[in-house]
Amino acid sequence: MVQTATADRSNSDLDSSLAAAEERYRADNPKSAARAQEAARAMPGGNTRTVVHYTPFPLTIASGEGATVTDIDGHRYTDFLGEYTAGLYGHSDPRLVKAVTAAVEAGVGLGGPNRYDAELAQLMCARFPSIDLLRFCNSGTEANLFALSAARAFTGRGKVMAFKGGYHGGVFYFGEAGSPINAPFPFVMASFNDIDGTVALIEEHAGDLAAIIVEPMMGSAGAIPADPAFLEALRERSAARGVILIFDEVMTSRLGPGGLQEKTGVTPDLTSFGKYLGGGMTFGAFGGRRDIMSMFDPYAPNAISHPGTFNNNVLSMAAGLVGLRDIFTPDVAEALNARGDRFRDQLRAVIAKHDAPMQVTGMGSILAIHFQRAPIRRPEDTWPLDRKTAAQREGLRKLLHLDLIASGLYMARRGFISLSLPLGQPDFDAFAGALDEFLTTRGALLDAG
């Protein structure tokens, strides 16, 4: 009875703290509140991109410079969201501005190959071990759709293995509740980092299994790295059974000069790309083994058609080329990810100081904060077993997010962080200080939960 009373009181305290934080947020951001209401007249819930929605309403961002964003109420925030890994370069790198300006001035919508696309393709082939040939598209979602479709066409098989909790784009979402708008492929669902269970499923479905798609570190599911032995097992079994292994490196390609495939030493058959590789512009790409990608060679008989008006749009090609060639060089990639590892250790030290029921996961420049002590090796480890725990964690995520916004720090409500190149140690110190303040003032809410 004492434990129940304590838990009930803790939930009440969390609810009242959250209500006060939301009231403060509404008072501080009247223009964003009005904008959200206006937007709802033309878009469902005022939203056209679910991931940027949060309650009571999202901030409307007016501008960005370096690692700072400013909302329409005039508040400036240090940006730790990094456009969900797409904002690697920050918001105003002059080299990218120059490249995009030059592309616009030379004309857009040219209707043919341009002076940027082949050089960017060659650079990506040189950087990422799996890529013999590649094709561009418009987003990570498209890249995964084309990679999976290519695997099905190449093998003549139908099924696709994915992993519970995974996210591979707007029509490939395998979270706890699933999604009714997923692409209608016949999926075989396995558990991330479970070697024995996954191998058994590969063997069971080998006769009709076209592809295995996996992030070498799950990003949207909470920055959960794959065990090297797990990736090696996928590589060995897929090769043995003629199954196409696809690495979704839409997020993780920034975690090393040649992505996580280079860092882990595990080379997939196909890789999908997106996010930062367009230099801040809309971007996607998929590529890999020559024999698979040659299916798209229009000079070949019976070639597979892969149209797309904006596949090689000059803005993405120009910005992507300058970004990868001149800015995010291999040395810069190593340095950024080393800073991310140090920042993760810094946050873990703050959590340890308070002995708080929290942890920080991730690799390099991608991190995630979780409100739990139990180890996290797969997304299911973060799915609460009861509604009370789920509500408690959700409330704490909301409270942390609102407190950080009040401190001038911007990140995803779910606790996701991706670092951009302009961020420096003073920014990391400010974030660690804000987390320390949160645990000092809100710690009782965590302990009681």
Image (cartoon, rainbow, N blue to C red):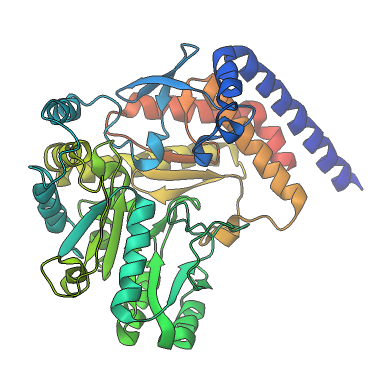
Q: Which residue is drawn at 62% across and 34% down?
A: 398
Q: Which residue is drawn at 47% across and 28% down?
A: 410
Residue 151 vs residue 431: left or right? left
- Residue at the limit of the structure toward the right, as seen here: 1
Q: Can residue 266 be seen in this view?
A: no
Pick the quarter of the image with the C terminus.
Answer: top right
Question: 40 or 447: which is nearer to us?
Answer: 40
Q: Can residue 143 be seen in this view?
A: yes
- Residue 288 in the image: above or below residue 180: below
Tell me where residue 3 appears, x and y as whole percent. Answer: 85, 47
Q: Which residue is drawn at 70% across and 40% down?
A: 447
Q: Quadrant of residue 431?
A: top left
Residue 240 vs residue 314: left or right? right
Tell me where residue 217 appears, x and y as whole percent. Answer: 40, 57
Q: Quadrant of residue 242?
A: bottom left
Q: In which quarter of the image is residue 55?
A: top right
